[in-house]
Image (tube, rainbow, N blue to C red):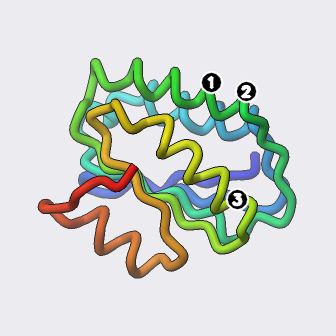
Amino acid sequence: MAYINDWRVKGIYRVFIGEVSGDEIVEAVLEIEGDQRFDDLDYIINDFRQVDKYEVSERDIKTIVKIDKHAVKINSKIRIAIVATHEPIHEWAKLYCNKMHDSPYDCEVFNSMEKAEKWALSSSSQGAC
């Protein structure tokens, strides 16, 4: 498993480590959305800073977007923060947010954890997908 989920009171911090594939990201998304605590989440922080190698295709992104847009029916108030310091992963994350633009979820990509946490925990955040 190339990720760890850390459940918090109203959110989740998920860190991806080492080699990450699109299938593993899909698995991580399904794991959270299949958990009863998902109904009460306000935010998800996805931390990709420790990823050394990744293989994520546009097809993988479309799959993740489809899953997340379906999850809106269960919980429509989630803010999704993505922390990525490597440019290719940052671009992948921006593509994901762009594809989520018509979703009720707010989505933003950050270069630092501090900014991501501040935005995710803010009740007045404005999505920039």
Q: Are marks 2 and 3 in contact (CB under 8 Å)?
A: no
Residue at 34% from the left image edge and 31% from the top image edge: 102
User: Residue under circle 2?
Assistant: 59
Specify the quadrant of the image occupied by residue 123: bottom left
Give the spatial CA distance, label 1 vs label 2: 6 Å
State which tag comes first along the sequence, 2 or 3: 2
Can you give x and y, in whole percent of width and height, for residue 56 in the image?
A: 77, 42
Amino acid type assigned to the residue bearing label 2 in the image: Arg
Q: Is residue 65 left or right of residue 103?
A: right
Dot 2: element: helix
Residue farthest to the left, as pictured: 124
Can you give x and y, in whole percent of width and height, for residue 117 in the image?
A: 36, 71
Q: Are marks 1 and 2 in contact (CB under 8 Å)?
A: yes
State which tag comes first along the sequence, 3 or 1: 1
Checking the image for residue 63, the label placed there is 1
Can you give x and y, in whole percent of width and height, for residue 58 in the image?
A: 72, 34
User: Residue under circle 3?
Assistant: 89
For mark 3, does the 10 Å Cα neighbourhood hold few (<14), some (14 to 19), or many (20 or more) residues? Answer: many
Give the spatial CA distance, label 3 vs label 1: 17 Å
